[in-house]
Image (cartoon, rainbow, N blue to C red):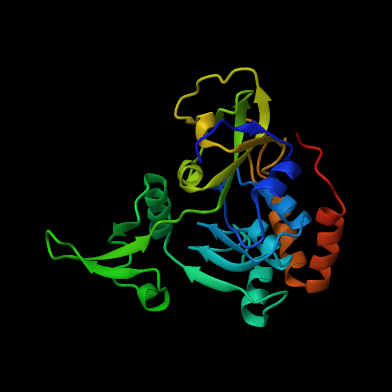
Amino acid sequence: MVGVARILQLDEAIAELVHDGDVVALEGFTHLIPVAAGHEIIRQRKKDLTLVRMTPDIVYDQLIGAGCARKLIFSWGGNPGVGSLHRFRDAIENSWPVPLEIEEHSHAGMANRYAAGAAGLPFAVLRGYAGTDLPQHTSTIRMIECPFTGEELAAVPAINPDVGIIHAQQADRAGNVQMWGITGVQKETVLASTRSLVTVEEIVDELTPRPHSVVLPNWVVTAVAEVPGGARPSYAQGYYERDNAYYQQWDPIGRDREQFEKWLEAEVHGTARSAR
């Protein structure tokens, strides 16, 4: 959606941009994961969401356990460095708290789907599924013949989320965003989405150019919210390190429904972000 990014509070942005039944992508790779935005989605009790993410980790486990999701489109899912996502597993095996549909792709397939969505193309073509059985189980993978060489290739449809949410280090007061460090498909997520929200560590008067940084101009972003610490327990390069203990502590919480519900009430529903 072409316009100029508005500066909103996080709760205002989620209330305005995320609707029940939406396709929502919260992307970040290793760091800059928009955890605070995910918690605000839970806090506002959004439901029937199709959640999209290349590598769903604990914030998606929390969203699924809170009953926000009806479907997950993903490639790899787990608690990085620790093990499984137990709320995700419980939803698949026992439909708790609600049934969860899944659509599984490879990393390359997901990345190409975002790239196609960002480019305004209907689908992407790649070789990545050759020799796998994913095409037999995922209806959004179709084998096609190259019209030039006759080679068999895989086609996957573009991803165009209703809402794309990412976290970045900085935005200026006009809503231009800058992020640096390890980047994944954040840029493509914003460009592919109908509406977008970028949470940032801080809003500054002027962005300082940095080597290899990604800059998103304000006309491709719907809203910006200042959320210091908004990526914790993942890290934000230049601001804070990864909280490894949090990921380890999540495992016993995620394993037990009663423990999870206590955590949910104390750490999400019982709190409110003061972010701007």
Q: Say which quarter of the image contains residue 57.
A: bottom right
Q: Say which quarter of the image contains residue 200.
A: top right
**Foreground: 127 or 40?**
40
Residue lying farthest to the left in this orientation:
149
Q: Say above or below: 138 vs 231.
A: below
Q: Say above or below: 170 vs 54.
A: above
**Foreground: 42 or 257?**
42
Q: Is residue 84 visible?
A: no
Q: Position of residue 125 (x, y in %)?
A: 29, 58
Q: Say above or below: 220 vs 24.
A: above
Name which residue lies at 85% across and 49% down. 271
Q: Position of residue 13 (x, y in %)?
A: 69, 43
The reply, left or right, for residue 16 in relation to residue 44 is left
Q: Say which quarter of the image contains residue 42.
A: bottom right
Name which residue lies at 71% across and 64% down. 251
Name which residue lies at 69% across and 64% down. 47
Name which residue lies at 63% across and 74% down. 89
Q: Position of residue 43 (x, y in %)?
A: 78, 55
Q: Is residue 252 visible?
A: yes
Q: Position of residue 242 (x, y in %)?
A: 66, 44
